[in-house]
Every structure is written in structure tokens, then in C-alpha cells.
Image (spheres, rainbow, N blue to C red):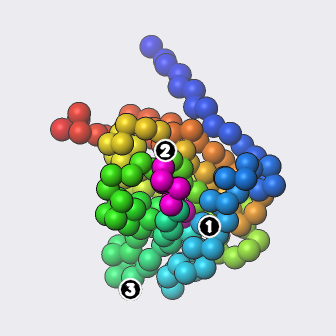
């Protein structure tokens, strides 16, 4: 039997179409991207996380001469957040990426980051909204991280 899945998400053609709150978070992610340490790939990524107490935390990709030792912006940001605000809930996360200012292709999170995001979404029992974009142009917004990782591996799989 062939089954089909549907995924609901929003698409905006420019940053100007975003709500005030979403735009603020995207701009925070863009700001955080400036401090990425992407010495090897030159591909800079910034992430910003909004907590339910209104605090915004940021992260960026951190590379290393021993390549696999580096970490994506999403995980840098979320691990920092959970480590420092373990009892707050994450409302939303935004990611801005590109080698330079010309990138208008939304950069979607890698599989490892999706797995990590989903762990915390399940743990907090509340959806984490997730926006991703290039340096300008199109923005994709998911209503929950579970939507971009079907058939995920979680504690029930153990
Ligand atoms: N990277 C991220 O930070 N987030 C993603 O979702 C994709 C990739 C980083 C990892 C590495 O530093 C660089 O981008 C190139 O892969």
C-alpha cells in the first residue's frame, strides 16, 4: 500500500512579509551569523531562539581544523539555550545562512540538527516554530520541528 504524507508550512517571498516578531528573530539570527567561525567552509550560519520569557539567545556555526569537531549554528544555539535556561520553553527559532550577502536560497537544517531540535520539542511538549532563510528573499516557516523529520528516532524507539 502506498501512503502519502502532507507537510504544512508557510512560505514568504521576502522578509518584509514576516510579522514583526518573526522579523526581529530573523534579524537577530543574521546578526549572530556575523560571529560565525566558518574558517574552512566560508559558509556562515546564524541562529536565534525566542524563549517563552521573551529572552532571545543566539548561536552560529563553529568550525574546527579537525572538521567533524565543528558544530552547526542550530545545535550551538539550542545546546546553549537548554544548558542555561533548562526550565524555559522555546517558542521559535530562526536561521539565516549564506557564504555572502547575495544568497537568497533558504538553507534548511541538516539531519543531525533536526534530530536534536525534535528531542527538545518533544521534551518541552510544545511545538517549536522554525524559520529558515538565506541572506534575503524567500523564508520558510514550519509550525513544528516534527514536520521536517518524519519517522524520527526518539526515546520510544529505544
Ligand atoms: N551548517 C550549519 O550551521 N547549519 C546547517 O543547517 C547546515 C550547515 C554549517 C556547518 C558548517 O560549519 C557549514 O555550515 C558548512 O556545512
Numbered range of the magenta stretch: 47-55
User: Which of the pair 42/60 is nearer the observer?
Assistant: 60
Residue assigned mark 1 = 28
Residue 72 lies in quadrant = bottom left
Residue assigned mark 2 = 128
Which residue is found at the position 62% from the left and 59% from the top?
A: 25
Residue assigned mark 3 = 65
- The answer to which of marks 3 and 2 sits earlier in the sequence is 3
- The answer to which of marks 1 and 2 sits earlier in the sequence is 1
Q: Which element type, helix, strand or loop, lies under badge 2?
A: loop
Q: Mark 3 touching mark 2, by CB under 8 A?
A: no
Residue 49 drawn above or below residue 92: below
Outermost residue toward the top in this view:
1
Q: At which x and y percent is residue 106? A: 66, 56
Q: Is residue 29 left or right of residue 17?
A: left
Q: Which element type, helix, strand or loop, lies under badge 3?
A: loop
Q: At which x and y percent is residue 137? A: 78, 58
Residue 1 drawn above or below residue 44: above
Mark 3 is surrounded, within 10 Å at the Cα level, by few (under 14), some (14 to 19) or many (20 or more) other residues, namely few
Amino acid at each position: 500500500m502506498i501512503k502519502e504524507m502532507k507537510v504544512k508550512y508557510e512560505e514568504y517571498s521576502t522578509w518584509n512579509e514576516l510579522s514583526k516578531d518573526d522579523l526581529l528573530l530573523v534579524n537577530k539570527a543574521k546578526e549572530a551569523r556575523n560571529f560565525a567561525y566558518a574558517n574552512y567552509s566560508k559558509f556562515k550560519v546564524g541562529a536565534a531562539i525566542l524563549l517563552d520569557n521573551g529572552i532571545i539567545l543566539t548561536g552560529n556555526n563553529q568550525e574546527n581544523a579537525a572538521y567533524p569537531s565543528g558544530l552547526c549554528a542550530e545545535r550551538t544555539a539550542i545546546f546553549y539555550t537548554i544548558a542555561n535556561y533548562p526550565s524555559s520553553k522555546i517558542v521559535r527559532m530562526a536561521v539565516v545562512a549564506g557564504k555572502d550577502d547575495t544568497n537568497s536560497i533558504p538553507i534548511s537544517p541538516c539531519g543531525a540538527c533536526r534530530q536534536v531540535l525534535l528531542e527538545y520539542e518533544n521534551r518541552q511538549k510544545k511545538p517549536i516554530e522554525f524559520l529558515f532563510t538565506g541572506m534575503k528573499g524567500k523564508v520558510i516557516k514550519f509550525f513544528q520541528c516534527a514536520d521536517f523529520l518524519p519517522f524520527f528516532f526518539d526515546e520510544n524507539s529505544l
